Amino acid sequence: MPALLRPALTALGVACLVSAASLASSGAAFAQAKQPPAQSQAPSQAPSQEAPAPTEQQAPPLKQIALTDKQIDGVLAAQKDVEAITAKLPENAAPDQKLLAQLDEVAKKHGFAGYDDYNNVVDNISLVIGGFDPATKKYVGTEAVIKSQIAQLQADKKMSAKDKKEALDELNEALKTPAPAVENKGNIDLVAKYYDKLIAALGDDEN
C-alpha cells in the first residue's frame, strides 16, 4: 500500500483509522516531497522576507473535489500496482524520478491524469473515511471518531501503559489539528457505498 497511507490507516490497532487530518497532511507531504524546496532551486538569491522558510515547508492544503464512482473504482483497481512500487521506497524517503514515473504510468493506466491526480483522489477519500465510525460504518465526523477512540483507549485494560500513552498523545494531537470539513457532501454517501472495499484496499494489509 502507499507509504503515505500507512500512518493513519494502520495506527493503533484500536480502530480502522486514526485521523483524516493526519492522513491528508501525510499525503500532501508525500506529494510535496517530489519537488525540491524553492530555496534550493535558487541558492544565490537572498532569503525573501515575503516567503519565510517555515511557511514554505508546510504541506499544501487538500484540494477537495467531488468524487465519482469511476475515480473510486480506479483507486481500488490501482492499489496492488501502486503498493508494489511504493513498497520499494525506504521509510521517510522522497521518491526518485524513476519511481515517480512508474507511479504516473500506473495512475494513467487506471484512468487518472497522473499520480498527483490519483493521490488527490485518495486524499479526498481518506478525508471522508476519517469521519466514519468503524463500528457503525456511519459518518459522524472526524472529531467524534477521534474522541471515541480516546475513550476506547482509556478504557483498555490490556494495552501497555507506554503504548497507551503514545496512542493517546497521537490522538490528542490530532484533535488540535482537525481535518477540514467535507465540502462535497455527496462524497460521504459515495464513500459509504464503497466503505468495506476501501477499508480492505487502503487499510493494514501488511500485518
Image (cartoon, grey):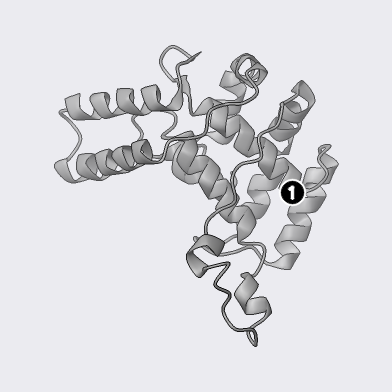
Viewer-nearest residue: 82 or 28: 28
The image position of residue 107, as x and y in percent, is 78, 44
* Total numbered labels: 1
Q: Is residue 1 found left or right of 142 in the rendered image?
A: right
The image position of residue 197, as x and y in percent, is 61, 23
Residue beneath disc 1: 115
Q: Which amino acid lies under the numbered mark 1 shown in the image of this protein?
A: Tyr
Assess disc 1: are there few (<14), some (14-19) or many (≥20) residues with their C-alpha within 10 Å of its C-alpha: many
Position of the N terminus by quadrant: top right
Q: Residue at x 66, y 34 (%)?
A: 64
Q: Is residue 148 found left or right of 202 in the rendered image?
A: left
Element assignment for label 1: helix
Farthest residue, direction bottom: 44
Q: Is residue 196 above or below residue 49?
A: above
Residue 79 visible in the picture:
no
Viewer-nearest residue: 51 or 181: 51
Q: Residue at x 75, y 43 (%)?
A: 117
Q: Quadrant of residue 71?
A: top right
The image position of residue 59, as x and y in percent, is 55, 53
